[in-house]
Image: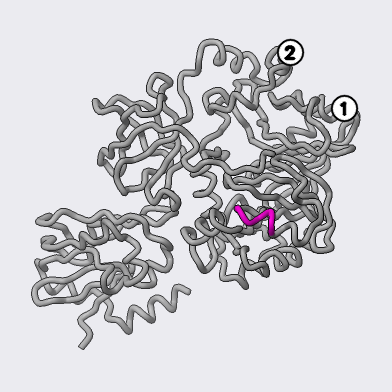
Amino acid sequence: MSDLRFTKDHEWLRIEGDAAVVGISDYAQEKLGDIVYVELPEIGRKVAKGAEAAVVESVKAASEVYTPVSGEVIAVNDALGENPAEVNGDAMGKGWFFKIRLDDPAELGDLMDEAAYRKFVEGLE
Amino acid sequence: MGESDSNALRRTPLYALHHELGGKLVPFAGYEMPVHYRPGILAEHRHTRTAAGLFDVSHMGQIRLIGAGADAALERLVPGEIKALKPGRMRYTLFTNDQGGVSDDLMVLRRADDLFLIVNAACKEQDFAHLQCHLGAGVAAEFLEDRALLALQGPAAAAVLARHAQGVESLRFLGGAVMTVAGIETLVTRSGYTGEDGFEISLAADRAEALARRLLAEPEVDAVGLGARDSLRLEAGLCLYGHDLDPETTPVEAGLNWVLGKRRLAEGGFPGVAVIRRQLADGPARLRVGLLPDGRAPVRDASPIEDANGRVLGQVTSGGFSPTLNRPIAMGYVAAAVAAPGTPVEFLVREKRLPGRVVALPFVPHRYART
């Protein structure tokens, strides 16, 4: 009954009704290392699938976070402003980035479920 | 030095140990080097500031200059005072080019019968060729390929090393001596690249892992990777060659006037002396400064620096996050007229304008053992 979906760019989505919460996977936070800054989209912004929606910065470098689905940003995780390390500590929970109201739930069909993502990540190692 | 006949990455004598310690190895200056170990860059950085960090810097070039006129010969390539350098003393200097730019920065230690140079990994072949080409008759350059280099840095470094080496306490900042450390013959200098007290230890490559293990067994010592080495040196306001120094940047622009020997400036006889004299007399057009973004977003190398009206003032050359100050810090070059601490600036990052200001360097005070 997992409502989690993943992208090949290591974002995760948790489907909540007609919306989805988006973050980066545990694999991604591990690869990035210590996260010191997260730039989040403005609430109300319309984003198209595959567009850059957030930026996550580790000590070493900045990385873009792409939205896996199209829609309107309806919430962002302001707590990351003060405590970006939450992404390292709890990437799949308290380290969420933004919530988006889905334009087209059919886009979810392109994403991996948890088992498929796990397999995908194993193939990268 | 032999030709590098493949693109294969080189390994230091501590390669196996890096793996064992969970090091994340990345390509750096032609070597596979640990950017961090299991604790991560922030923890390794803080450990170095509070206890002691052990760094593998064996990728750096170690070169001996042998011959009675070695000091005079080296002075033909650098603006520093080398002839007056006393045995057992070390000095920071620069290879300059005819335009007064910097082709590498290096440390020079005078020993009883030679000069011992440490140069950057990415420049070492070029530096060695440059030396061989210009030293002249009677002075030989020898590349020490079979040596490793370890750095032990932090407020606990001296106490730790003293457990394994007699006489370490008698070295002061930028002193060097041959010492037996844990039964291994080494060349120890009290120097480093973190702003902390600490030591750099040159030794035979085949003994490096044994010494590293002995030092890591000390409770104060953790392995620290190149990621924290970079954030430590940035907090200390120290230049990274290829970023803060390059062939188009002069020592005067870099604010490194203290490396220009008084006698050397008067006598001349090093590449770029005319440009350097002119910049000293007239003032340089731009200067290296510390930069402090107001917000939380890091500002990185190559970000443009502008004033509030969009006039270009300069460019960031090193930027990142300061674990000690828990905020972003940066270094860069701005027009001399706006180089005073307190001057407001704006950084262009991802098409946004982030406010900040010029500040004095270093960000974190040095804690060298000067006396």
Residue kind at label 1, given as amino acid type: Gly
For the point 54% across and 45% down, which residue is it? B233
First reached walking from the N terminus: tag 1 or tag 2: 1
User: Is label 1 in a helix, a strand or a loop?
Assistant: loop
According to the picture, the residue beneath numbered tag 1 turns out to be B69
| Residue B9 x %, y % | 63, 58
| Residue B87 picture quarter | top right
Left or right of B357 in this view: B33:
right
According to the picture, the residue beneath numbered tag 2 turns out to be B267
Give the farthest residue toward the bottom.
A1
Mainly helix, strand or loop, the magenta region? helix
| Residue B121 x %, y % | 65, 46
Dot 2: chain letter: B
| Residue B312 x %, y % | 33, 26
Span shown in magenta:
B155-159
User: Is label 2 in a helix, a strand or a loop?
Assistant: helix
Residue kind at label 2, given as amino acid type: Glu
Up/down of B94 relative to A58, above or below: above
Report the colour scheme.
one colour
- Residue B168: within the magenta? no
